[in-house]
Image (cartoon, rainbow, N blue to C red):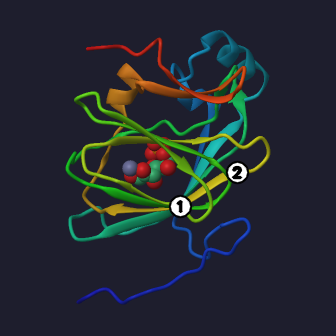
Amino acid sequence: MADFPFSFTIPLPGAVPSRIDNHIRRTLSSMKGQFLDHETYQAMLAEDDRVIYEVYEIQRPAVEGELLMGISIVHPGKVGNEFFMTKGHFHTVLDTAEVYYCLQGEGFMVMETPEGETCVQPLAPGNVLYVPPRWAHRSVCTSRQADLVTFFVYPGNAGHDYGTIERLGFRKLVVEGENGIEIIDNPRYAHE
Ligand code: F6R
Ligand code: ZN
């Protein structure tokens, strides 16, 4: 029997969807090794294992033909000079894309391919970002006070490969420099 169509709302501001099947909270402790300034990371963690970002998932079967949707909320803050961000990942099925629609806040999507191409795109309310197949992606909140809120949709069979980024890092980082927000080369990027 076919599934029945459904709808839900994403009220603004706030963007907590009216339908939530799963709520993920990622705290500082789950981001070990991801931020450039390890010392500041340890010091912050010793004080408080704070929530860096949250995801509200609308669950569907994780199979080809389905679309998985949800809301991603990255909170404002920095570890040293580096803005709060998601872990970031490649899709396990590398040839799967994703669409992000920015609802609130400001930030960037940091992306790269396994071959080393990089792209960092701004996110602001109204921006639609197409992440093509093969591009790893991480969202970064650069606002001082506001959450970065995006709606995303991607193929049900995509899967998530977090391990590659945990091992290598991203090639580009978003930091607060002397003259404001800067996109820099990651000095700790671990070439394989
Ligand atoms: C799904 C996707 C987003 C992220 C979310 C949290 O493929 O890209 O839903 O999962 O923004 O980021 P991660 O998954 O990197 O912790
Ligand atoms: Zn993804």
At 72% from the left and 65% from the top, the residue drawn is: 14
**Residue farthest to the front, as pictured:** 179
User: Disc 2 designates what residue?
Assistant: 147
Provide the residue designation for mark 1: 127
Identify the image quadrant of residue 11.
bottom right
On screen, 82 above or below 119? Answer: above
- Name the spot of residue 41 as percent of width and height, x first: 66, 18
Q: Secondary structure at mark 1?
A: loop
- Helix, strand or loop for disc 2: loop
Name the side, left or right, on which 112 lies relative to 146.
left
Instruction: Return the x and y of residue 152 as percentages of the image width and height.
Output: 46, 61
Residue at horizontal 55 percent and vertical 81 percent from the top = 8
Circle 1: residue type: Asn
Left or right for 84, reference 133: right
- Mark 1 Cα within 10 Å, few/some/many (few <14, many 20+)? some
Residue toward you, 171 or 163: 171
Picture coordinates of residue 187 (x, y %)? 47, 12
Position of the C terminus by quadrant: top left
The residues bearing labels 2 and 1 have C-alpha atoms spaced at a distance of 15 Å
How many numbered circles does the render carry? 2
Q: Amino acid at mark 2?
A: Asp
Relative vertical location of residue 60 with respect to residue 185 in this rendering, above or below: below
Q: Residue at x 66, y 67 (%)?
A: 15
Disc 2 and disc 1 in contact, CB within 8 angstroms: no
- In this view of the protein, can residue 57 be seen by the observer? no
- Can you say which quadrant of the picture contains the N terminus? bottom left
